[in-house]
Image (spheres, grey):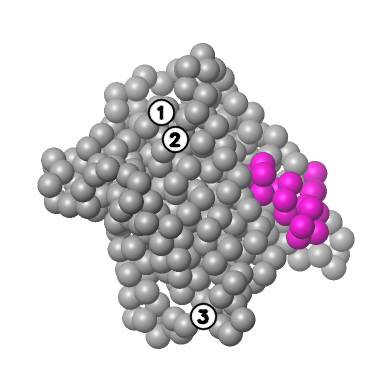
Amino acid sequence: MSASTPATAHTFPREAVWLLTALTLGWGFNWPVMKIVLTEMAPLHFRTWCLFFGAAGVFLIARANRLPIGVPEGAWGKLVVISLFNMTGWNILAIYGIPLLESGRAAILGYTMPVWSVVLGTMFLGERFTARRALGVALGMAGMALLFGGEVAALGRSPLGATLMVAAAISWAIGTVLMKRWKLAMPASTLTAWQMLIGGVPIVLLALFVEKGSFRFWELSLWPALGVVYNLTVAFVFAQWAWIKIALLAPIGVSTLSTLMIPVVGVFSGMLVLGERPHWTDFAALALVVASLATVMPLPAFLQRTRR
């Protein structure tokens, strides 16, 4: 790294570390929660509740912080395209893929997103594919490969589920790259809320006219109903805002690599909630993913002083 290059150019911003921690726990634990909800609620009906009430919650956060909630002139077209990839594509593909796979394994496939985003970021954003970033990708993907390596036979029995989750990951990566490329002049809260609102329109139309089911989540039994509440408050209002805030703060390769801990939390929370048994590969993958995160997280202060 040259003397003129900021030390943070290829590392995770310090001010966002607490956001990443909360996001990792919130989204990681949500994978088994979604699996529970989908035992009783139709997928797109479930996502309609999440997106529209999530948008309302984030708009309230923006208003409470006296942030502008309007869309800048000339930004509507770009905002719609970003929303279709980040919200519509991801949510439709993932919510139909989850029931076809174990929740932890669905999380692993969904979080192949960093691989796609690093490639797209290098191609379209001109970001450097540094040795440190390449190491992070290699370690993270090795960890995820270990986690689903033992499930190859199961995935073979459900190729549609695996295909849907990988397609969801690609859609999310495209949306993230577009956010960085176009850099709409909007606060993270406002940008998040509008994406959920716009991205939710095709989903509610499909739910109304294509999918069979009821929008009355209060008719669900206790745990699926609580799962919907968890999604509305934690997974969408907080976590969606936190992710977009992180994505706007950090370089694309760094911000997306930082999500690699989420599927690990998803796998272990699936074991806790759904009774799955851990294997040695789960622990080995955890070590690899933590090492991957270390390649993009800032060094402790004493180590930075040592390097100087």
The residue pinned by badge 2 equals: 97
> What residue appears at the point 17 percent right and 52 percent down from the top-left corner?
216
- Left or right: residue 257 versus residue 188 is right
Query: Which part of the image, by quadrant, shows the N terminus?
Result: bottom right
Rendered residue at 79%/49% (across/down): 129
Q: Secondary structure at mark 3?
A: loop
- In the rendering, at what x and y percent does residue 68 appear? 46, 84
Q: Which residues are magenta?
A: 114-131
Q: Which residue is tagged 1?
A: 100
Q: Are marks 1 and 3 in contact (CB under 8 Å)?
A: no
Q: Are marks 3 and 2 in contact (CB under 8 Å)?
A: no
Mark 1 to mark 3 CA distance (whole Å): 38 Å
Q: Where residue 206 sits: x, y (%)?
A: 38, 51
Circle 1/circle 2 CB separation < 8 Å = yes
Instruction: Decide if residue 31 is on the left or right side of residue 283.
Output: left
Q: Given the current orientation, which residue lies at the most extreme front position?
A: 209
Classed neighbour count for the residue bearing mark 1: other residues with Cα under 10 Å, few (<14), some (14–19), many (≥20): some
Q: Which residue is mark 3?
A: 71
Residue 33 shows up from this direction: no
Mark sitting earlier along the chain (3/2)? 3
Amino acid at the residue labelled 3: Val
Question: Which residue is at the far right?
Answer: 2
Q: CA distance from mark 3 to mark 2?
A: 33 Å
